[in-house]
């Protein structure tokens, strides 16, 4: 009777262990599926981040080129402005027939100043766009960090499930 009771108890423990193993296997499979989905999301985020960084780098290079061109144009405009002021000075001291030259120089100076203002506006827009890209890069980095933290938590839970399963098997023996 004691042997039968012991065998019955062993059989119940084996069934319980089998049920626990099946449940653990199901949970591990579900965790693995979630982990795979998270891996895919992380890969997508990394790709988006890399793409965003590449775009930001290209945009930065373009902005630097535009800035350099704007600086060169500004220096050129400054030289033209200086030359225009010198011509204006000469024109003022010259004869009355040089009044038309003076008017022409003033028009060129105004055009130069308008062109400089347009370049300044373009530069401000380019800087704003660069700031926007940097903010997007920061957001993507934060999302990636959150996803990686979730992956670590899932891996830790999976490790705990494996340890529980191993202990259950050891206890069964």
Image (spheres, rainbow, N blue to C red):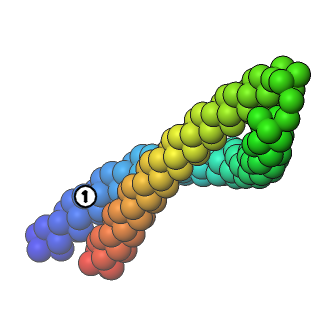
Seen at 60% across and 49% down, the residue is 49
Looking at the image, which residue sits at the far front? 95
Find residue 10 and report its image quarter: bottom left
> Could one spot residue 30 in this view of the protein?
yes
Q: In the displayed structure, would residue 162 be above or below residue 150? A: below
Q: Position of residue 21 (x, y in %)?
A: 36, 58
- Judging depth in this view, the residue of 22 and 16 nearest the camera is 22
Quarter in which the C terminus is drawn: bottom left
Please state, as top left, top right, bottom left or bottom right, where the N terminus lies in the image: bottom left
> Residue 83: which quarter of the image?
top right
Q: Which residue is mark 1?
A: 16
**Front position in the image: 90 or 6:** 90
Task: State the SS at label 1.
Answer: helix
- From the top left corner, tell me how far across and down residue 28 is, in percent: 42, 55
Q: Position of residue 85 (x, y in %)?
A: 75, 42
Where 23 falls versus 152 (above or below)?
A: above
Q: How many numbered discs sit on the rendered protein? A: 1
Q: In the image, what residue occupies the spot 83% across and 41% down?
A: 90
Q: Is residue 98 left or right of residue 2?
A: right
x, y (%) of residue 63? Answer: 70, 46
Q: Residue at x 18, y 66 (%)?
A: 9
Towards the viewer: 52 or 13: 52
Residue 94 is left or right of residue 115, and the answer is right
**Residue 147 visible here:** no
Q: Residue at x 79, y 28 (%)?
A: 102
Task: Please name whichever residue, 141 or 105, is drawn nearer the observer in this view of the structure.
Answer: 105
């Amino acid at each position: 009777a004691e042997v039968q009771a012991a065998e019955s108890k062993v059989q119940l423990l084996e069934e319980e262990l089998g049920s626990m193993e099946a449940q653990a296997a199901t949970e591990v499979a579900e965790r693995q599926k979630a982990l795979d989905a998270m891996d895919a999301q992380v890969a997508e985020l990394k790709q988006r981040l890399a793409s965003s960084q590449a775009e930001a780098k290209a945009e930065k290079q373009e902005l630097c080129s535009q800035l350099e061109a704007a600086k060169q144009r500004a220096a050129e405009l400054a030289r033209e402005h200086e030359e225009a002021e010198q011509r204006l000075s000469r024109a003022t001291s010259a004869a009355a027939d040089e009044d038309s030259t003076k008017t022409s120089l003033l028009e060129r100076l105004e055009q130069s100043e308008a062109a400089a203002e347009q370049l300044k506006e373009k530069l401000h827009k380019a800087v704003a766009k660069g700031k926007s890209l940097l903010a997007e890069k920061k957001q993507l980095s934060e999302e990636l960090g959150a996803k990686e933290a979730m992956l670590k938590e899932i891996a830790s839970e999976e490790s705990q499930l494996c340890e529980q399963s191993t202990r259950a098997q050891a206890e069964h023996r």
